[in-house]
Amino acid sequence: MIRFALIVASTLGFVLTAALGNFMAPLLQELERFRPQEQQEPQTPVQSRVPALGGLCLMVSTLAAVGVGWTAACIAQPTLLGSESQLMTRLLIALFGAQAFGAIGLADDAARLRSRAQLGLRRLPRLALEAAVAAAVLVLLAGNGCLPTGLQLPGAGYVELGGAAPVLWGLVLVALVECARTADGADGTVCGTAFAAMLGLMGVMTLLGWFPLGVLPAALAGALMAFLLWNFYPAKLRPGAVGCQFLAGALGCVPLSVGWPGLALPLALPYWLEGGMVALQIIVWKASGGRRQLFGTAPLHRWLEKRGFDPVNIFYIFGVLAMLGLALTLQAARAS
């Protein structure tokens, strides 16, 4: 019966996102017309005309689908409201983290539409807000006895980190969100990566015996499947900062909530590559006094564009990377 709950969550996520997409696509297209030309990102002419608040569809539909799916799970397994109630606590903390990171992205997108003077929120205030959300997630997990104090490493077993663990988890959450932001430049890459990651999380929940917690990745997988109808090339909607940060928040908070924070590394492999290229580019450029660049351009999807790859092929490359991350995740879960 728990499987039925996952099917309900996934189906509802798909249906709600499809319905919201049909409603929001023309509305956001109209809003985009009022956006000052000077503040648009340096993207291709086609991309610059694509509305960038589509992540709202994902946030709303996932929230509703998780609620209905978890209700179905509780009906199928009443112990989720009794002796296994901590599972609901873990689910709610992960959902809170994802939605809170998405809210920061929404504020960033709103600032882009509202102000001619800036490109969204300034970096330091945005990082401070992200750090505050990460800290809130960690405090909630610790207060409920759910915060992992170590890391499961292949071949080494469980490695205790002690007091350094919360600091490391916070840095991973903020870094993952920032990396995901850099990936929203090629059609379908952000959502395609997240879809593969949600499939991986559902597999991990099954292997580790946390099956009811699969409601969140199941709902998000269904929502992403529908959203890709608008986000695949040629895109009619982009997730924007709200979608990127919501998806990255889910990718970081769900593994953390189930005690496996290390899964965020392989699951979000394309995001880490995108953000890593940008970080290395900046480090080399600053170290050389602005005289040298490590890559011709960054992040990865821009580097591929410069080498003649079209948006569809870039999507497939990111898909291969995401599936590689999924395979590494499942292998790590089986080895535990």
Image: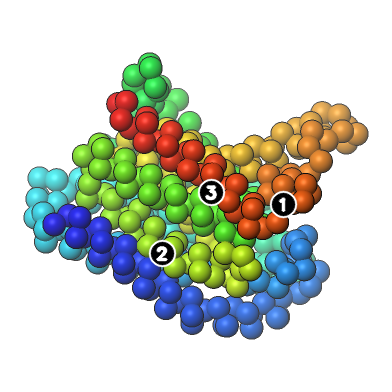
Disc with the residue nearer the chain's start (1 vs 3): 1
Q: Amino acid at mark 1?
A: Phe
The front one of 263 and 126 is 263
Q: Which secondary structure, mark 3?
A: helix
Mark 2 Cα-neighbour bin, 10 Å: few <14, some 14–19, many ≥20? many
Residue at horizontal 61 percent and vertical 39 percent from the top? 273
Q: Which mark is residue 309?
A: 1
Task: Give how far apart the Cα atoms at labels 3 and 2 are.
Answer: 17 Å
Say the numbered circle drawn on residue 223: 2
Q: Quadrant of the C terminus?
A: top left
Q: Residue at x 57, y 64 (%)?
A: 232
Residue 319 is situated, as x and y percent measured from the top left of the image, at: 53, 48
Answer with left or right where residue 320 lies relative to residue 214. Answer: right
User: Which residue of the protein is positioned furthest toward the right in this rendering?
Assistant: 291
Q: Which residue is mark 3?
A: 319
State how many labels appear. 3
Q: Amino acid at mark 3?
A: Gly
